[in-house]
Image (spheres, helix red, strand yellow):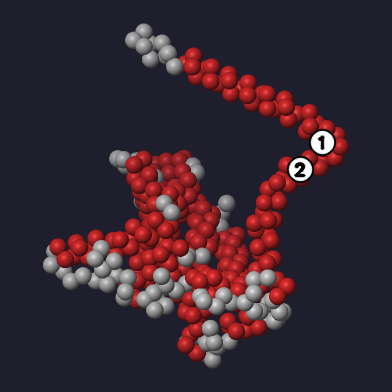
Amino acid sequence: MNPGGVDLNRPREGAAAAALSAVYGGLMRAVEPPINRLQRAIGAARMPYFFIAPNLAIFGIFVITPMLLNIWYGFTGGTSIELASRPFVGGENFASLLRCADYLDPASCERDRFWRGLYNTGFFVALQVSLMVLLSLATALVLNRRIIGRGFFRAVYFYPVLLSPVVVALIWKWVLQRSGALNAGLEAVGTTPVQWLLEPGWARFWAIFVSIWAHMGFYTLILLAGLQSIPAELYEAAQMDGTPGWRVFWRITLPLLMPTMLVVLVLGLIRAVQVFDEVYVLTGGGPGSATLFMVQFIYETGFSNQLHILGLAAAASMILGLTLLVLTLLQLRLGQGTPA
């Protein structure tokens, strides 16, 4: 803007908008004749199918087809990847996974690593999801208040979500390894270094911590949007009545936020059950099988072990998918009673 108050950039912006409008109009005029001919040929009622056909084709190729192939592999045996070369074995792959003398003792199971992965996944999901929902809620409540640097803190909490899971794991591996930044700090203050990733208890703790650190910003953002959708008049009325803050939270905030929390819970549960990349890079599933999870078992059984048992991996993935489906339906059923 010049000293006289005239914005010199405005003519350029107007010219750019006019150029874009001209290009858009030209494209629409070019597309309109064939679209009109197609509509006359198939009728207006069938036109929606024409527009959604590309998306359906992509969904069918990349989702439905792999799912059907997975089901086929789950009921066939052998090590060949060719469908015609795989003999039908019925439910033998599922029976092999579920065959146990004592279900509380993975060592007594025919596929003990499957059960160790199952138990580790259950432990991880219970702790990671509950802690992440609570921390995300607390963070969203703080960021919803008028605090100094609110925009900065919102960006800081969301920033890890933008990073690749592999990058997140490599950063924390650099911090937690024997000669990493954390042990260097401990040595500097005269404390004995800790094998953070080589002791089972610490490895489980850091697997949960890193996963929460990487994904909490996303769920905080969802809860923040839910908080901002609550009418301000309710809080103003509560303030006029002199209602204590904790009562406002329990009687207004929490009930009205419950549908959003249910969404966060379902998304967090699905993400936690599918945990793989961060923990695989961070610990490799160790020490031993302390951080071996279901998806890593499926990956190793089907692809990374010397013998590729695709049928067993496919059967394990179907069990995992069905477990997720049941848990999601159960949560949605329980959430039907929450206020919309």
- Front residue of 335 and 21: 21
Image quadrant for the N terminus?
Answer: top left
Residue under label 2:
50
Residue visible at 54% across and 17% down in the picture: 15
Query: Label for residue 95?
Result: none
Eyeballing the image, is 124 above or below 137? Answer: below
Q: Earlier in the sequence, mark 1 or mark 2?
A: 1
| Residue name at image x 70 percent, y 75 percent | 85
Question: Would you say residue 141 is visible in this rendering?
Answer: no
Residue 229 horizontal/vertical position (percent): 50, 44
Q: Which quadrant holds residue 247? A: bottom left
Query: Quick one: 47 or 168, which is closer to the camera?
Result: 168
x then y, percent, for residue 163: 41, 51
Give the residue furthest to the bottom: 101
Q: Residues within 10 Å of mark 1 (few under 14, many from 20)?
A: some
Amino acid under disc 1: Leu
Q: Amino acid at mark 2?
A: Phe
**Residue at 68% across, 60% down:** 64
Report which residue position mark 1 lands on.
38
Identify the residue shown where x is 57% and y is 60%: 335
Residue 329 image position (x, y, % from top left): 61, 65
Q: Nearer the viewer, residue 295 or 87?
A: 87
Residue 195 position (above or below residue 19)? below
Describe the element under mark 2 as helix, strand or loop.
helix
Residue 302 in sight here: yes
The reply to whether dot 1 and dot 2 touch (C-beta < 8 Å) is yes
Query: Considering depth in this image, is 77 or 118 the residue closer to the camera?
Result: 77
Q: Is residue 196 left or right of residue 105?
A: left
Q: CA distance from mark 1 to mark 2?
A: 9 Å
Q: Judge left or right: residue 237 versus residue 49.
A: left
Disc 1, SS: helix
How far across and how far down the image is residue 145, in percent?
A: 36, 44
